[in-house]
């Protein structure tokens, strides 16, 4: 069966960020995030029980008022503090308070009818939007973004647009706090089935991936 666009996109990022992904791709599954299926189900359940649905909570302006996007299609698990940056700090990026539901447009695709600039795009990962738009003509676009992100992390810079972080983190923290306060709800599952990550960084002198 042909991979969905979502699975293909996930694989592009896996290849870009994990140079040894092909060698370790034993089960053939292409997870979009490091979350296990059980963890994703737990997080979705928490949001559905607490706020009523698993929908995009990206803040948008409606006249002079701010509201949530509210889209319920193509909603993805967004890591508020990104996976790569979290691992550099030895933090678990898949902790439930670090996950927020975003639609693909506000998460990584952006608005196709707008220039790829921060001032005109309501998207957390502007570089992902660029890679996605460029990929049909440049199959190395994801790799280029991965290298750029590695360099920015090495320099202590943010490779995402952090403008919305506080909003997303507060919504996620409140949701998980309410859900976990009920002793009848199950605990967050361990991610024991997650494939081990072999963290590497880009060596700009050798121009190759090396062990961190």
Image (cartoon, rainbow, N blue to C red):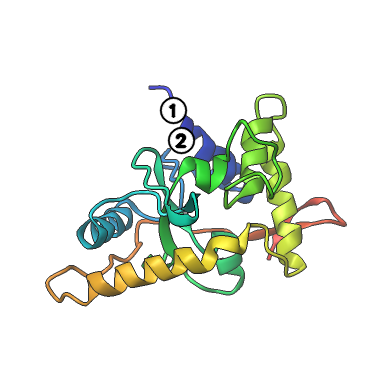
- Rendered residue at 53%/37% (across/down): 9
The image position of residue 30, as x and y in percent, is: 45, 41
Would you name the residue on which mark 1 appears?
A: 3
- Rendered residue at 26%/51% (across/down): 53
Instruction: Count residues near mark 1 (Cα–Cα under 10 Å), then give few for <14, some for 14-19, many for 20+.
Output: few
Q: Can residue 15 be seen in this view?
A: yes
The image position of residue 44, as x and y in percent, is: 29, 54
Q: Quadrant of residue 164?
A: bottom right
Against 54, is 137 above or below? above
- Rendered residue at 31%/69% (across/down): 176
Would you name the residue on which mark 2 appears?
A: 7
Instruction: Count residues near mark 2 (Cα–Cα under 10 Å), then give few for <14, some for 14-19, many for 20+.
Output: some
Q: Do the residues labelled 1 and 2 touch (CB within 8 Å)?
A: yes
Q: Which mark is residue 107?
A: none
In-image side of 201 versus 98 (left or right): right
- Rendered residue at 38%/22% (across/down): 1
Against 87, is 101 above or below? above
Q: Gap between marks 1 and 2, in whole Å?
A: 6 Å
Label 1 sits on a secondary structure element that is loop
Q: Can residue 93 be seen in this view?
A: no
Q: Nearer the viewer, residue 170 or 206?
A: 170
Q: Which of 112 and 182 is in front in this view?
A: 112
Work out which residue is located at the far front of the displayed protein and give it: 64
Label 2 sits on a secondary structure element that is helix
The image position of residue 181, as x and y in percent, is: 21, 77
Q: Which of 151 and 117 is in front in this view?
A: 117
């Amino acid at each position: 069966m042909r991979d969905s666009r979502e699975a293909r996109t996930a694989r592009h990022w896996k290849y870009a960020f994990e140079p040894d992904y092909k060698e370790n791709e034993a089960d053939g599954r292409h997870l979009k995030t490091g979350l296990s299926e059980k963890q994703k189900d737990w997080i979705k359940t928490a949001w559905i029980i607490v706020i009523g649905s698993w929908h995009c909570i990206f803040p948008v302006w409606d006249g002079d008022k701010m509201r949530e996007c509210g889209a319920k299609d193509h909603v993805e698990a967004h890591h508020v503090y990104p996976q790569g940056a979290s691992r550099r700090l030895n933090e678990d990026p898949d902790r439930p308070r670090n996950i927020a539901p975003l639609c693909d447009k506000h998460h990584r695709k952006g608005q196709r009818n707008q220039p790829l600039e921060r001032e005109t795009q309501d998207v957390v990962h502007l570089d992902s939007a660029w890679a996605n738009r460029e990929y049909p003509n440049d199959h190395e676009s994801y790799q280029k973004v991965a290298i750029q992100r590695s360099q920015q992390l090495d320099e202590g810079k943010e490779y995402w647009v952090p403008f919305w972080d506080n909003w997303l983190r507060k919504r996620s923290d409140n949701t998980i706090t309410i859900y976990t306060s009920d002793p009848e709800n199950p605990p967050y599952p361990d991610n024991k089935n997650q494939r081990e990550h072999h963290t590497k960084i880009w060596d700009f002198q050798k121009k190759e991936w090396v062990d961190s």
